[in-house]
Amino acid sequence: MTATDASDTESTADTNPTSTPKRAVVLLSGGMDSATAAAEARDQGYDIYALHTSYGQRTETRELECARQLADEFEANDFLQIETGHLSAIGASSLTDDEMAVADADMESDEIPSSYVPFRNANLLAMAVSYAEANDCEAVFIGAHSEDFSGYPDCRPEFFEAFERVADVGTKPETEISIEAPFVEWSKTDIAAHGTELEVPYEHTWSCYRDDQPACGTCDACAYRLQAFQRTGVRDPIEYAERPSYVEEG
């Protein structure tokens, strides 16, 4: 598992025209982090196999629409959507349980937020590794980052390192698949700035936990996203019901 230096935007693509193209599965949720991870994978010379999972989240229709648009934008070799009802059936998350309200953003809290879906990333990565092994992919890219793992235990660097060991043990002897979380030590602001340099089409992404259209502007996902764009001085191109300022004035 590797992390990309925020200052290093040089492509590592293999320039040998006779070499076999590298392949990577990208967990493409439709959000800004996964879109930037796809751009990073492409910039590193990988052919993209996009994997999108609908698991009963409130905005799954809009997320799928965005993921499909992003796969087209990045000229993905393949796009696979998997519908899984078990995470919704298990519940215990405001993303999947209609009886739990999506809380307004509390960016100072140290508590695990109600939007945490229990052990979600292990489920997603397991599917991604299966998809990668079936298609001779060398890597699985996920867009998790430091502001995620402050609240979500399955976004920590040690989790991805451990999962890479699981993938190594649980696949064929000749299979080698790395778990790439290139932004795991980055902030959301770092991601927005890097994605802007890579010309990520953020107008085709969706982050809001509550609504399909427009984004609410006040849930955790909207708040961190808006703050990132406000810090970089770039206007977030999607529509919001509210667009509060999440940066200190002065």
Image: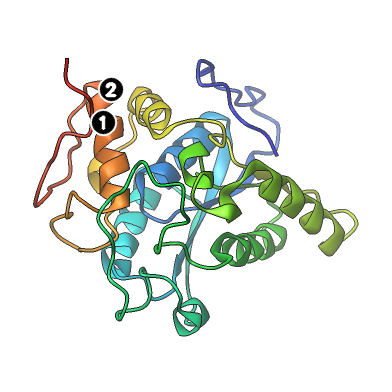
Image mark for residue 229: 1
Name the image quarter holding the C terminus.
top left
Residue at 60% across / 67% down in the picture?
123
**Picture quadrant where residue 103 is located:** bottom left
Residue at 24% across / 38% down in the picture?
226
Q: Position of residue 169 (x, y in %)?
A: 86, 59
Name the image quarter holding the N terminus.
top right
| Callout 1: SS | helix
Q: Position of residue 122 (x, y in %)?
A: 63, 62
Residue lying at the far left of the rendered structure: 241
Q: Position of residue 59 (x, y in %)?
A: 28, 66
Q: Position of residue 99 (x, y in %)?
A: 30, 81
**Picture quadrant where residue 233 is located:** top left
Q: Are marks 1 and 2 in contact (CB under 8 Å)?
A: yes
Q: Nearer the viewer, residue 209 or 113?
A: 113
Under mark 2, the amino acid is Thr
In the picture, measured across the screen, residue 174 lies left or right of residue 81, that is: right
Residue at 27% across / 70% down in the picture?
101
Label 1 Cα neighbours within 10 Å, binned few <14 / some 14-19 / many ≥20: many
Q: Is residue 141 above or below residue 121?
A: above
In the picture, measured across the screen, residue 77 lies left or right of residue 179, that is: left
Label 2 Cα neighbours within 10 Å, binned few <14 / some 14-19 / many ≥20: some
Q: Is residue 205 visible?
A: no
Q: Which residue is mark 2?
A: 232
In the picture, measured across the screen, residue 73 lies left or right of residue 223, that is: right
In the picture, measured across the screen, residue 162 lies left or right of residue 131, that is: right
Q: Is residue 23 visible?
A: yes
Q: Nearer the viewer, residue 232 or 112?
A: 112
Q: Is residue 81 above or below residue 230?
A: below
Under mark 1, the amino acid is Phe
